[in-house]
Image: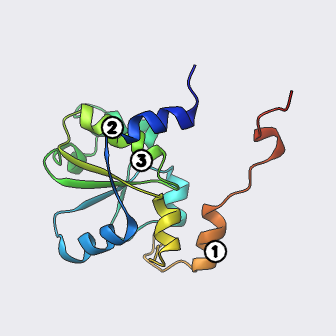
Amino acid sequence: MKTFKQLVSEHEKLVDEILPWDLEQKLSCSHGLLVLDIREPEEFAAMHIAGSINVPRGTLEAACDYGYSETVPELVEARKKEIVIACRSGNRSILAAYTMQLMGYEKVASLKTGLKGWTDYEQPLVDLSNDEIDPDFAEACLSPDIAPEQQKPVR
């Protein structure tokens, strides 16, 4: 049995990662870059990188292929396009990048540190209306508390 951390650790060696400042630079000069946010729709609605598209991790494989109700044509046709995948902390995006590589995506990378690192680097996030999110609010939302029942039991 493997833990989530073990799965991420194994797969991060197999995918490219990009740091927030590198993504900022790419966004300022690359018109073909696709930022793919794989968080849940409610997370995306609350805050995301401007111009990114949302495909939740749970429907990623179907979104990347034709013939499904989850199909996202822009994503299906982006196999040769540069794609940076974002999540909250950079863990889910590692697994998504690995999966997309298996599906034939050639230039896919994970945003190391995720949106948490993006805001730590003082880059803006927007809501669905494209209004900028208060950085303190973003920080609080991107650093949720872990409830006692979510902790590993002490034995």
Q: Is residue 102 above or below residue 151?
A: above
Label number found at residue 98: 2
Q: Earlier in the sequence, mark 1 or mark 3?
A: 3
Q: Which percent across, then down, holds residue 50?
A: 37, 71
Please state, as top left, top right, bottom left or bottom right, where the N terminus lies in the image: top right
- Residue under the image location 18 percent in, 48 percent down: 78
Which residue: 47% across, 38% down?
9
CA gap, disc 1 and disc 3: 23 Å
Residue at the far top: name it. Answer: 1
The residue carrying pointer 3 sits among few (fewer than 14), some (14 to 19) or many (20 or more) residues within 10 Å by Cα, namely many
Residue 46 location, quadrant: bottom right
Mark 2 or 3 closer to N-term?
A: 3
- Helix, strand or loop under label 1: helix
Residue at the extreme left: 80
Report the amino acid beneath label 1.
Phe
Q: Is residue 37 left or right of residue 76?
A: right
Q: Secondary structure at mark 3?
A: helix
- Location of residue 102 in the rendering, given as x and y in whole percent from the top left corner: 25, 31
* Mark closer to the chain start, 2 or 1: 2
The residue wearing badge 1 is 137
Local packing at callout 2 (Cα closer than 10 Å; few below 14, some 14-19, many 20+) is many
Quadrant location of the C terminus in the rendered image: top right
Q: Nearer the viewer, residue 152 or 39?
A: 152
Display coloring: rainbow
Task: Tell which tag, 1 or 3, sits nearer the viewer.
Answer: 3
Q: Which mark is nearer the camera, 2 or 1?
A: 2
Q: Pointer 3: what residue?
A: 93
Which dot marks residue 43?
Answer: none
- Give, as a three-letter code, the residue at label 2: Tyr
Task: Pinpoint residue 133: horizontal percent, then vertical percent.
Answer: 54, 77
Marks 1 and 2: in contact by CB < 8 Å? no
